[in-house]
Amino acid sequence: MGIDVSRFTPLEETALLTLYARALDSRLPRPILGDSDADRIAASIDYDFTGLGLVTSVVCQAALRTKMLDDRVRMFTAAHPNAVVVDLGAGLDDGMSRLDGPPTVDWYSVDLPAVIALRDSVLHGNPRAHSVPRSLTDERWLEAIPAERPTMLIANGLLAFLNEQEIVSLLRRVTGHFRSGELAFNDYGRIGWVSRFAVKLAPQRMFKAVSGQWSGYPGFKDAHRPEVWNPRLQLIEETSLAHAPEVELFPTWLRMATHLAGRIPSMARKARILRYSF
């Protein structure tokens, strides 16, 4: 019998969805992220993962955006061996073990208490890994994290679950607490009613689980928008997943569709990595 997660709320269950996407990627003949530990963790949890109905496109895109964020963390910690890495809405992702960066880096994983409790029970311990069992809407999540060292913050799949005011408050708290660093996150561009309607109609339980948690925030087209919310942020990178070299590892039909989408700016913005310095 695996670990019981039957009391997880729909929002907490999204951590299981992204875990399973990484696990399925690790089973592919040509994995994009290759996180074999995700498969081990999924096997230890009593949950109907197959019932989520994860489609190939979601598995590949989830793996690719995680790898792209990994690459940004790797660059930052190579330049700042004494850095602090903060994973916002970390779920069950063990990026610290995957990257195997400088031993002087401290890694803080922030998520809801129930998710952190599960995380601590299934991940290998590391004296430099720290869990923060707080909602990101609770200002106290910052209290345990050093503010003076160079800081790399990442948010993988998080912002779609926050409304605009919550995002603005989060960004202001980040730059108000940490002296300097970078913030990188995946973004979906502007989310229109057509996209929302299509997700609601999709038969897969995966889409229903995610759409039910969206706060109605429509997103933004211009990657400079967060600079308006917070003048301390400066956009330093906007990269579409459609333009990443790892797209060549996608199945043929998905690779061709992704290349086509990458030629259309509005489509390319639907899956992008944004990075800001402060």
Image: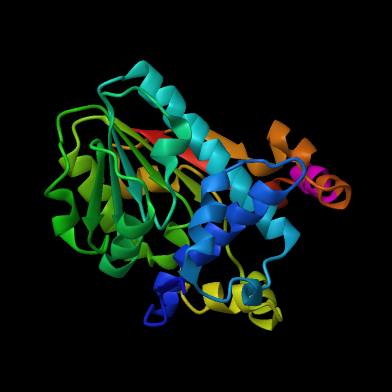
> Residue 36: horizontal and vertical position, in percent?
57, 45
> Residue 2: horizontal and vertical position, in percent?
46, 71
* Residue at 50% from the left image edge and 44% from the top image edge: 223
Task: Decide if residue 219 is in sight here.
Answer: no
The magenta segment = 257-263
Q: Which quadrant would the C terminus be assigned to in this image?
A: top left
Q: Is 170 placed above or below 146 here? A: below
**In which quadrant of the rendered view does residue 238 lie?**
top right
Q: Is residue 199 left or right of residue 111?
A: right
Instruction: Pick the residue in front: 139 or 67.
Output: 67
Instruction: Pick the residue in front: 42 or 264.
Output: 42
Magenta-colored stretch includes residue 232: no
* Residue at 75% from the left image edge and 43% from the top image edge: 262
Task: Decide if residue 230 is in sight here.
Answer: yes
Colour style of the rendered protein structure? rainbow
> Residue 203: horizontal and vertical position, in percent?
71, 81
Q: Is residue 229 left or right of residue 244?
A: left
Furthest-front residue in view?
1
> Residue 260: horizontal and vertical position, in percent?
83, 46
